[in-house]
Image: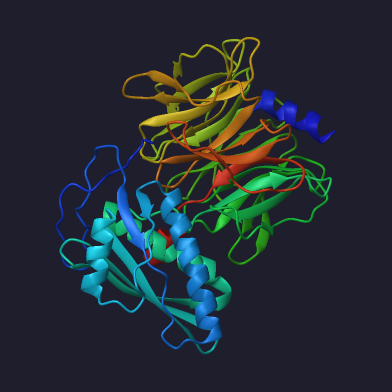
Amino acid sequence: MNLNLDEAFKKVLFFAFIFCCAVSFAYAQGDVYLSLSATGKRSDIAIESFFSPNKQQDDIKYAQLLKEIVQNDLILCRYFNVVIGDPEANAPLDTKLVFWEKKGAAVLLNASVKTLKPEQISVDVKLYDVVSGEIILKQNFRNESVNYRYLAHEISDEIVKRFTGEIGVACSRIAFINNSTRFKELYLIDYDGYNLRRLTKDKKLNILPRWSPDGEQIIYTSYLYNNPDLFSLNVVKNRRSIISKYQGLNAAGAFSPDGKKILLTLSRGKYPNLYLISPTGEILRRMTDGSYIDTSPSFAPNGQEIVFISDRPGYPQLYIMNIDGGNLRRLTTSGFCDSPAWSPRGDKIVFTMRQQKGNYDLFVYDLPSSKITRLTNNQRNNENPSWSPDGRFLAFSSTRSGRSEIYVMAIDGSGTRKLAELPESSYTPAWSPNLLENKQQR
């Protein structure tokens, strides 16, 4: 039954930013480290074993764990190559810098780890320019020991920010649906596939999760009360509320970039059209009105335009229009389209398309050039793409293994990895905003 409902909903509903070492300037702490140029290569970083000065068992354990997580983060972000080596642990810094320079490293990362009471970890991080010996980053990070993975992700994101001026995505999470309980429930997982957490235990059908811009809420459609209603789950306070419960379809769409409006599909006993509502469910405006099906809306990052799917030409196609309902236009494609998502940078729209006698594959529509690029190619069905907060990666579902699972890849289609080994089938990933950046702004 669930599969049929999914199919019914389907019917009714890098900018590759990579650098390498070119010049080497270090500004005052807090500024961007300008050792990068857009040549398509990555910067070479050496990561020494994290040091535990107190030599306590917990310190040694967390030092090793934190180092492994940070190293994995820096590899996954695709800005860096990790240089392997083993200098003498007690060698002077100058000797170590010479060692790493000969290995081809541009920068050196080391850290000192101490456990504090009550159950807190303190990490002193230093990042050096290997050639000049200047300190690029010197910062203390602290968190509860139960949050050691998040602590490591904070360190990684700060390193990325120091090199690029933009915070990394290591502190982000991905919401998705999984049916391992025989029902489709809502789950949450870290961007690197760890810390799986089940959010609902409804024994009902839940679908189409979407994040609020502040990263505190997930909206989704649920059959909890035997009607496809729109719910909101506050993942910080672990509190759920119902937003929209009109008879018929209340299909999760998207938050506006300011978080003050939600765009969704309502049928209200008629054709499914787009509506703009408040976060409390008040209808603010009917966006479309006609005897056709309009679904899967996504806001442009400026909040002034939306992209959505409509079958007004007789089959599902991409359309863009202004938030006031004007300037409606179709983006010409060659197949059946679904699940568009506007990029965080505003220049691209990723979507799913099935061409004649083919599978569902992922494509990117470049708005400035009107060029369409194919990202997957007949590896069974690839659907429901969701952008990383920095716009460099996509999470999506794919049946390439024989069942639906969540994968992550760069926006040029390279570097595909399975998010995690999870039981049964997983669907409709939704990548969170940058949680660390939102935390720092609060």
Residue sitting at x 44%, y 88%: 54
Q: Please indicate, yes or no, whether residue 253 appears anywhere in the rendered image.
A: no
Task: Looking at the picture, tell me which residue is in the foreground, 353 or 303.
Answer: 353
Q: Is residue 101 above or below residue 42?
A: below
Horizontal relation, residue 81 to residue 283: left or right: left
- Residue 169 position, x and y percent, is 44, 53
Q: Judge whether 9 appears above or below 82 on screen.
A: above
Image quadrant occupied by the N terminus = top right
Number of numbered callouts drawn: 0
What's the colour scheme?
rainbow
Q: Is residue 416 above or below residue 149?
A: above
Residue 390, image x and y in percent?
40, 46
Could you tell me which quadrant the C terminus lies in? bottom left
Give the percent coordinates (x, y) of residue 62: 52, 75
The answer to whether residue 208 of the structure is visible from this angle is yes
User: Foreground: 361 or 421?
Assistant: 421
Report which quarter residue 5 is drawn in. Answer: top right
Q: Which sits in the foreground, 65 or 253?
A: 65
Residue 253 left/right relative to 435: right
Q: Is residue 62 left or right of residue 95?
A: right
Where is residue 43 drawn, in percent x and y?
29, 49
Could you tell whether 135 is left or right of 396 in the image? left
